[in-house]
Image (cartoon, grey):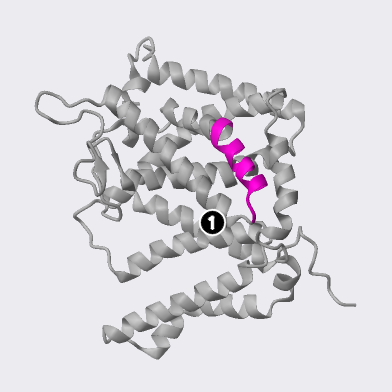
Amino acid sequence: MAKDFSDPRKLGFLRVIQVLCAFNVVITVALSAFLVKGNYELGFSDYLDYLNLLFNGVLFWLIWQRKAIARPFAIAYALFNIAAGSLYNVFTGEFSLPLQLAYSLLDIVLIVYFATSRRVRAQLVEPFSVEVKRRQQEADEQFFNLRSWPFWRNLIIYFCVFSVVGHWLEAGYCTFIRFGILPGTYDPTSQIWSDWLYPFCVYGVGAVACVLLFYPVKNFLMRTMKGTLAPLALSFVLNAAVCTLIELVMGLMLNQPLPDGSLPLWDYRNMFCNFMGQICLQNALAFGVIATLMTWVIYPGLETLLGRLSRDVMNVVFVVIVVGFCILFFFYCINVLIPGLGSVIASGDA
């Protein structure tokens, strides 16, 4: 009797690949935070490793969504790694066939597995866009129900959670600036490097704005335009433009030059394609990427995940998160004094 590889609950080695992709992304980014600028120099292999993080993230998502394109993507990604590493070693005069085979072992395993596995052919069958667009669109529009308590309950949860997660994302972004992968400046004394549970409410507001503003626009574009690429590209442009306009307005209101000419909150005057030091192209693109990920991937993914939990469970989760957020807000933002300890938590001395 032939073995059935189509059971979606049994991914076999595909699950191992997913775990390895996620592990590589999390560990590499986490370890990067410990690098100190000036004490190292990024080489070709380091840039290739960081590029691989992007490939790992995409491959993880494609397998998770059972997309058929994951198979050629994985093979092309592995071939690129082998070719790039081999050519670099040839040009630097360090090429050795046995060593290159050892370095390329994981990529060779990926190529063989995705090219020959029956499980891959049975599991990765979902088309990438057109055939599933209507079905996905119907599911997405069901999430946006302004008259339902679950919608607003989840929205409050996202505000609380992303107020803290946004803090971590900013720290990660500044870390890339810190060790020279991205241009820009950062403040080594900023609170983002301590008090890791400090809630930056601006990021919670940003998450809510993505749901209330950008998500309906995304659904409208999907209904009125053919395919997925055009709505995605236009959504990215609109998201980046609106976020950048908000930053500009906030900058003109709150980030005015001091007597010495410096800008107190942020200063992009040394960045490429900036306007008055308040906005710049790099941040605009970053805003577009984050808002588009939130609108197209993270929000519908979270709604699907939370939708699997019962109403009672979600209401308990809501209470726990809101109460926990209020505790953090009072500790950090209102600077509550703890008898005998002073403002320990607020000062970050704990």
Query: What residue is rendered at 40% in x and 46% in y?
Result: 286
Examine the rendering and report whether any part of residue 199 can be seen: no
Q: Residue furthest right?
A: 1
Position above or below: 96 against 301: below
Question: Is 107 or 65 nearer to us in this picture?
Answer: 65
Kindly indicate the quadrant of the structure image that contains residue 172. top left
Q: Which residues are magenta?
A: 212-226
Q: Which residue, as the protein is rendered here, is positioned at the far bottom? A: 97
Is 323 placed left or right of 169 in the picture? Answer: right
Q: Residues within 10 Å of mark 1 (few under 14, many from 20)?
A: some
In the rendered view, tell whether residue 316 sits above or below residue 88. above
* Three-letter code for the amino acid on which mark 1 is drawn: Ala
Query: In the image as oriented, which residue stretches furthest toward the front?
Result: 224
Q: Quadrant of residue 140?
A: top right
Quarter of the figure that contains the C terminus: top left
Classify 51 as above or below 259: below
Residue 81 is situated, as x and y percent measured from the top left of the image, at 45, 75
SS under mark 1: helix
Residue 220 visible to the viewer? yes
Residue 160 within the magenta-colored segment of the rendering? no
Closer to the camera in the image, 270 or 179:
270
| Closest to the observer, 296 or 341 | 296
Percent x, y for residue 28? 42, 56
Q: Main secondary structure of the magenta part?
A: helix
Q: Position of residue 84 (x, y in %)?
A: 39, 78
As displayed, is residue 285 above or below residue 203? below
Tell whether position 225 is magenta.
Answer: yes
Residue pictured at 42% horizontal, 81% vertical? 83
Residue position marked by numbered label 1 in the rendering:
22
Q: Residue at x 65, y 66 (%)?
A: 14
Determine whether, in the image, residue 289 is placed left or right of residue 96: right
- The quarter of the displayed image where residue 5 is located: bottom right
